[in-house]
Amino acid sequence: MSSSRKPPVVRGSGTSVSDRRTRATSRSRSTSPASTRDRQLKQQQLPKPTWDDIIQSSGYDPLATLQRRLDAQEVEMANRFKLQNDQLIHFNSRLEALLQENETLRQELKDAHGEIEELKKQDAALTAQQQQQASKPTPPKTTTTASDPDSMQVEGSLLGQGPDGTHASKYAHDFVPPKPTTFAQVAKSKLKGPPIPSRSKSRTRSTAGKKSNDTPISAATIEWAKRGFKDSKDEPTGYTFVYLKNQKRTKHSEVRRRLRIIGVPQARVVDIQFPSKGVVGLLIHSSFESILVELLTKAEIAIINNFDPTAETVINDPALEDLPDSEKKIHATEVYQQRMLRMCLHLPQAHLGHSILKFFHTQSGPHHISKTNLDIFTKRKPAPKIQRKPRNEDDEELFVKVTPPQHKNQENQDNDDQPMEV
């Protein structure tokens, strides 16, 4: 009975217990030591790849990649350092300019305080002098008339009769208090009318506020009067620049003040320019050059000869430091041309600005002015047109009208050659 029994079947699966045992047996055979040894022998026969082989097969080079990163960082650091260096140079230049301006302002403030103290002293002296003059008593002027008995009595007491009462004291002053007016005196003054001022007094009052013409004429005024009657061929024409050294940054007013102190007439200096750092230029007429040089030499002031305002060395801007010399010279020329055009446009006399630009336009060299700037000035400030007075019909009567004679015969025609009497 036992041999005829069927193997049990597990529910839920299509395999029997015997099939499962067969599979387990085959699996145990496959994992036997002999099969494991065969696989190990096969693995030993294959070459083991190295790290270089793996890198070479993948195409990745870490050293080259690292080198490229280092090169990129080096370029970036160099650019960053250059930018910071330029910023530092710019900040240093601004700091120097601010320090110089601060020093100039301090000096001007010191000079202003000195002038204020001097004016205060002068004001105090004038106030003391006025108080001293006001403290002195001024006796009033009294006029006497023969018709007034009271005034005659006062005059008699002052001339011959001695004073009495408080007027006899040594501390008494000369003032006599007026006596009360009576009705008769008031009526008498109304009948006489107001006093008529004399002509001499009115003339004195009218001329009191006028200045006298006794002021001496200066030598500069005499020279100006002489120049109007001299021949223009004797003196040089045109304009020129005289360049001087300037240690610190100053204003136009301070330069004019210094020139005034050493005796340079301000009316002869047309303009003051600062073409470069440490240089000041004076635009003057050519006829004044010899006088100015003599005054500067007398004051021991050195003159810069052959200065070129369009040279590349006058450019001190840190932003333009890397430009080549040719571009710097072009930029300096543009700055000089614009400075001259702006100066001539701001002159109160338009004809003077046109004369300056026209003269430098005809000259060659560093101070030459282009035709474009001359045309711009002429367009902005054209020459005034002369407006002629319209002719009046009544003016025709002032002219003699001559009518030619009529030719009646040959004799009259022969007489045409003779001059007519009008």
Image (cartoon, rainbow, N blue to C red):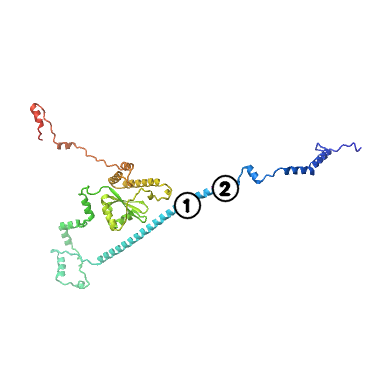
Q: Which residues are magenta?
A: 63-71
Is the residue marked by circle 1 packed among few (<14), some (14-19), or many (20+) residues within 10 Å?
A: few
Of mark 1 and mark 2, the one earlier in the sequence is 2
Quadrant containing the N terminus in the rendered view: top right
**Depth order, front residue of 87/210:** 87
Type of amino acid under label 1: Asn
User: Does residue 166 appear to the left or right of 281 in the view shown?
Assistant: left
Visible residue check, residue 185: yes
Q: Is residue 339 above or below residue 207?
A: above
Residue 59 lies, in percent from the top left, at: 62, 42
Residue 299 lies, in percent from the top left, at: 29, 58
Type of amino acid under label 2: Gln
Asked if the stretch drawn in magenta spans residue 270, the answer is no
Q: In the image, which disc is placed on residue 408?
A: none
In the picture of the structure, the residue carrying the numbered disc 1 is 85
Q: Main secondary structure of the magenta part?
A: helix
Q: Quadrant of residue 201?
A: bottom left
Q: Residue at x 65, y 46 (%)?
A: 51
Visible residue check, residue 31: no
User: Does residue 113 appear to the left or right of 90 in the view shown?
Assistant: left
User: Does residue 68 appear to the left or right of 251 in the view shown?
Assistant: right
Residue 199 lies, in percent from the top left, at: 15, 56
- Label 2, secondary structure: give it: helix
Residue 203 lies, in percent from the top left, at: 17, 56
In the picture of the structure, the residue carrying the numbered disc 2 is 67
How many marks the image carries: the answer is 2
Q: Residue at x 31, y 62 (%)?
A: 118
